[in-house]
Amino acid sequence: MNDEMNKKQTRQSAGTDRRAGGEKVRKVSKKSKIAVSSGKARKKRVNSSLEIEQQASSGRSEPQKKRSVFTKKKSAEEKPERDLTTSSHTAQRIDRQRQKLRKERMEARKAQLVKQYIALGAAAVILILAVVLLAACPGKSGEDFRTGEPAESVGEASAAETAAGEDSTAVEEGMTSVSSSEVRHFSFRVLLSDDMAGDDSVLTINEFKSILQQLYDANYILVDFYNISGVQQNADGTVTYTAANLHIPEGKIPFVLSQRDASYSLDRVGKGYASRLVVTEDGQLTDEYQAADGTVVRGSYDIVTILEDFINEHPDFSHENARGVIGLTGYNGILGYRTTEILGKSLEEGNAYAVYGVYDVAAEIEGVQPVVNALKEKGWHFASYGYNYCSYGADYELVVSDMDAWMNSVSGLIGGTDILLFPCETDIGSWSEYKADNQKYQYLKGLGFGYFCIEEAVNPSWLQIRSGYVRQGIKEIDSYNDYLEVMGES
């Protein structure tokens, strides 16, 4: 029992010694941590002192000896004062930079304003010069005239932006000056006799007479086609086209009239259409009309003769005795005369129209000359409508083939022309303008064509003038419904 008590006391004593030893170890560890911590703190204070000394040195006006990192720590009151000084210098630098940027921006803005004022001044000078030139040269202030823009246009200039200025001092009393860009162009086909009309798809004789009366009542006045532009003759023999103004009676609306394909084709003879144009013994123009039974009568059955009758009754409908433009094809001759060489050949020789007869071409050419001369004396102009309804939007080779045939069979009979009415509602280029690299334009220009007429479906009138050509939009009226649509009454 005593042995057990002794063992118990021995274990208690050993436990006490171990606890005491543990506490000593913990105390030693704590002291080590404190020592390490104190070392880190001293190192941190040293680094802080170095940073403070460096910042203070950068702000001094005179170099000072760098203080030891082991100098006495400054009081808490000195640190905020040094931080405030550093912040103040930084703020000053930022403020100086802002002022510099502000100054640079102001100078740049002043320079920009100066440039703008210079540009505005130059524009004002140019505008003044343009007004002076317009006053000195009326009717020649621009080359491109449009009365409106197609749905694609082309971002294009309107007629108001390029039209020539009106010189009121040169206009006689009771007259007014009108830009040629306002001239409308109405184009018709051969008329059909009313008693042969099966539907309303073709314009008839009485409908055309009614249209002329309506135009007259609405104060329309017929003007000469060549009045749509001016022409300057150059020393090298070429011409330059310029803008033009028309002086017409006040309140009148100018228009140009043309007829397309006045060949009086063989397949229409005896079917309600005029067969040819002739000159009477007293020098008047009239039509021959072949009835279905073969009877031939004379009278006013088509565009030319009906318009002549109307002008005789209403002389004021024609401005300065103006007439229209006659577009000619060549496949069946011209004006009802079978002047094309192929029409003198047989079917076996390649004449597809031999079923209507084989003609003495030489006699036909002789017979048409008095008619051509009479039309010119009246004031009518001739134009090409292509040889055989070839689309001039087709390949270049087809266009050349068609126009070469026209030049060989028609041009010499009428003494040549510089007007081209494009067949099939086509054109040879974009509406914006004919470019120098347009092969078709260069070919046609080389043949002497300078006036080009195209179908215009959007604007009431359209005119484009360049130094090398004139292009006008036309309204093709092939039925009375077409006329109502053109006049905005459909």
Image: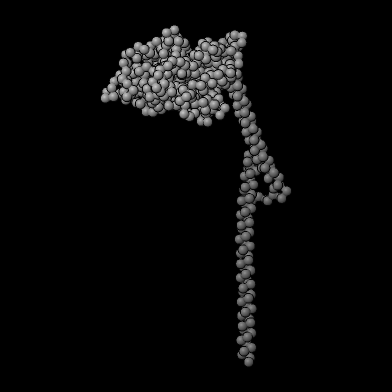
Which colour style is shown?
Answer: one colour
Q: Is residue 138 visible?
A: no
Whole-percent x and y of residue 372?
41, 12
Q: What is the residue that sits farthest to the bottom in this orientation?
A: 1
Q: What is the residue that sits farthest to the top in this orientation?
A: 282
State the quadrant of the N terminus. Answer: bottom right
* Residue 130 drawn above or below residue 89: above
Tell me if 422 is positioned left or right of 50 in this view. Answer: left
Could you say which is closer to the camera, residue 134 or residue 232?
A: 232
The image quadrant that residue 6 belongs to is: bottom right
Whole-percent x and y of residue 107?
62, 28
Whole-percent x and y of residue 69?
63, 50
Q: Is residue 279 visible?
A: yes
State the quadrant of the C terminus. Answer: top right
* Residue at (32% x, 16% y) in the render: 361
Could you say which is closer to the camera, residue 436 or residue 106?
A: 436
* Residue at (61% x, 61% y) in the render: 36
Whole-percent x and y of residue 213?
55, 19
* Residue at (49% x, 16% y) in the render: 306
* Residue 422 drawn above or below residue 377: below
* Residue at (29% x, 20% y) in the render: 345
The image quadrant that residue 42 belongs to is: bottom right
Q: What is the residue that sits farthest to the right in this orientation?
A: 77
* Residue 39 drawn above or below residue 370: below
Could you say which is closer to the camera, residue 35 or residue 171?
A: 171
Tell me if 108 is positioned left or right of 299 in this view. Answer: right
Could you say which is closer to the camera, residue 161 or residue 251?
A: 251
